[in-house]
Image (cartoon, rainbow, N blue to C red):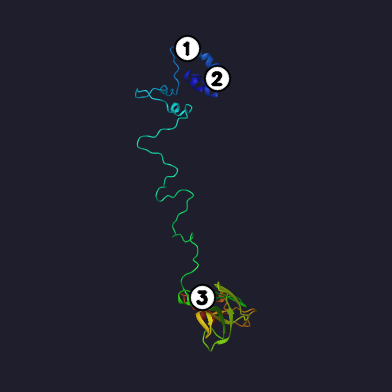
Amino acid sequence: MLVLAKALKVVGRSLLTKAQLVRAIERKWPKAAAGSYRYTPMYPKPHSAPPSGVALSGTASTSPARKSGLPLGLARPSLRSGHRARSASASPVEGHPRAGSRSASTDDPFTDTLPERYGQTRLILQARDPHWVHAYWELSGAAERRADGGRARLRVYELSEPQFSPQTIRRWFDVTLTPEARDWFIEVGQPAAWWCVELGILDPEGFVPLVRSNLVETPADRPSDEFEEGWPRLADALAAQMAGSVCSSGASAAWLRGAKPRK
């Protein structure tokens, strides 16, 4: 309606209500019809499609909708020459796996599981608390073959100092293992002590060690008896450094322990 009012040159058309605009157009319309005015729409009509059954080249053809039995407007789009439809089972583009598929690469460390064995003969000992230690091990090669042929057991040593030798052994005891065991919790019952474990077999000649563990110390089960340690005050050390008593590059920990606060 605004387009028609603009064509009829209605004054103040943008300020008129719909009813006022209709009356203004009716007053202008007879004058426009009597004159040489011809209304031309602002938007031309789209070109009409060719009749069904008539090809653009002039040769007869059948509508795709009629051939497929579908209603008009629902014809299947035809493929241009030289192009094939991709089937649902087509292989994905190289470097772009299909959605939902998992990569078969084993380079990602987060997708691989931890190996059960590393191919090494070793025995690891760790302290769990003041009264228990934990040992886990792996045997390979000749050590594994010897363990399969005998009664495997752990020999636990309490040491007087962090060094394994016949002179530092205070006492020892054996722990019999089950055939499928790969780790064992051992109750030592002695806090604040050094421990070492050997994994071996018991044959007619006695205990034959196959592998020896590292040394561990069980923690104490009570507060320490040492309470006279002198701890440096960082505030005093910093004040001494700022006052020029310490070189600009800092000081050693031994110097800070012996530094006295300034009075």
If you read the primary sequence from the N terminus, does the residue marked by circle 2 or circle 1 appear first?
Answer: 2
Element on which disc 3 rests:
helix
Asked if marks 2 and 1 touch (Cβ < 8 Å), the reply is no
Q: Which mark is residue 148?
A: 3
Q: Which residue is mark 1?
A: 33
Which residue appears at 50% of the width and 14% of the height? 29
Residue 237 horizontal side relative to residue 223, left or right = left
Quarter residue 196 falls in? bottom right
In percent of width and height, residue 119 lies at 46, 71
Which of these two is toward me, 240 or 21?
Answer: 21
In the displayed image of the protein, which residue is found farthest to the top? 34
Q: Which mark is residue 21?
A: 2
In percent of width and height, residue 185 lies at 59, 74
**Badge 1 amino acid:** Ala
In percent of width and height, residue 101 lies at 47, 51
Mark 1 against mark 3, which lies toward the viewer? 3
**Badge 3 amino acid:** Asp
Q: Residues within 10 Å of mark 2 (few under 14, many from 20)?
A: many
Which of these two is toward me, 6 or 124?
Answer: 124
**Badge 2 amino acid:** Leu
